[in-house]
Amino acid sequence: RRKMDYAASIERVKDCGWFWGPISGETAEKLLAGEPDGSFVVRDSSDEHYIFSLTFKLNGLVRHVRIEHDHGNFSFGCLLKFRSNTIVDFIDSAVAHSRSGRYLFFLHRRPILGPMRVQLLHPVSRFKQVQSLQHMCRFIILKTLRRDLIDHLPLPRRLKDYLNTPHYYSEELATQSLLTKRCTDSRS
């Protein structure tokens, strides 16, 4: 039952606008460039030891922090009082605490740097951008079907290839990534 709850909580995050999936830290920084302090996105962590990373803006600077997952709870690591068993509940609680003004998170980094303040006020939603019907269909298919079953679908090869391309939560980011790859390939 616990494994099912965990898997369901990971699936549930895909419905949240603030979750951008497998984007890089650099891409997350670009997303937050024109946003106000307190803006944030959650993304897949690039570190294999973590599931999610948080990218947020404070005092005009964009920062990144890994979200811990330990003993079935998501947290900012050392903040033992503040943890949740789903990532969605964890982020929702962090936003509610930040908006109340009563509570800011201070994450302890290396002693030389001192604590880092985290305030989550403005989720940057990938739903602000209108996606094509093709992209939305791919999103739903990949959300409901295991990737290893795509080749068994009664679809033309071209559509199967489209479904098997790396999945992005934002069509605009997928297009940018494809253009960057083409430019890099043409230089080689």
Image (cartoon, rainbow, N blue to C red):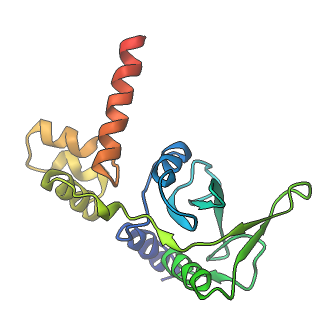
Q: In the picture provided, is 138 more to the left or to the right than 10?
A: left
Q: In the picture provided, is 63 more to the left or to the right than 24?
A: right
Q: In the picture provided, is 17 more to the left or to the right than 120?
A: left
Q: Residue at x 59, y 79 (%)?
A: 94
Residue 161 in the image, given as x and y percentages of width and height? 21, 38
Residue at far top of view: 188
Relative to 30, residue 121 above or below: below
> Which quadrant of the rendered structure holds the C terminus?
top left
Relative to 144, residue 23 above or below: above
Residue 128 in the image, given as x and y percentages of width and height? 30, 63
Relative to 175, residue 104 above or below: below
Whether residue 122 can be seen here: yes
Residue 97 image-quadrant placement: bottom right
Q: Nearer the viewer, residue 115 or 11?
A: 115
Residue 167 in the image, given as x and y percentages of width and height? 33, 48
Looking at the rendered structure, the number of numbered marks drawn on it comes to 0
Residue 144 image-quadrant placement: bottom left
Q: Residue at x 38, y 65 (%)?
A: 125
Q: Residue at x 34, y 70 (%)?
A: 15
Residue at far right of view: 112
Residue 69 image-quadrant placement: bottom right
Q: In the picture provided, is 87 more to the left or to the right than 17?
A: right
Residue 123 in the image, given as x and y percentages of width and height? 46, 69
Whether residue 166 can be seen here: no
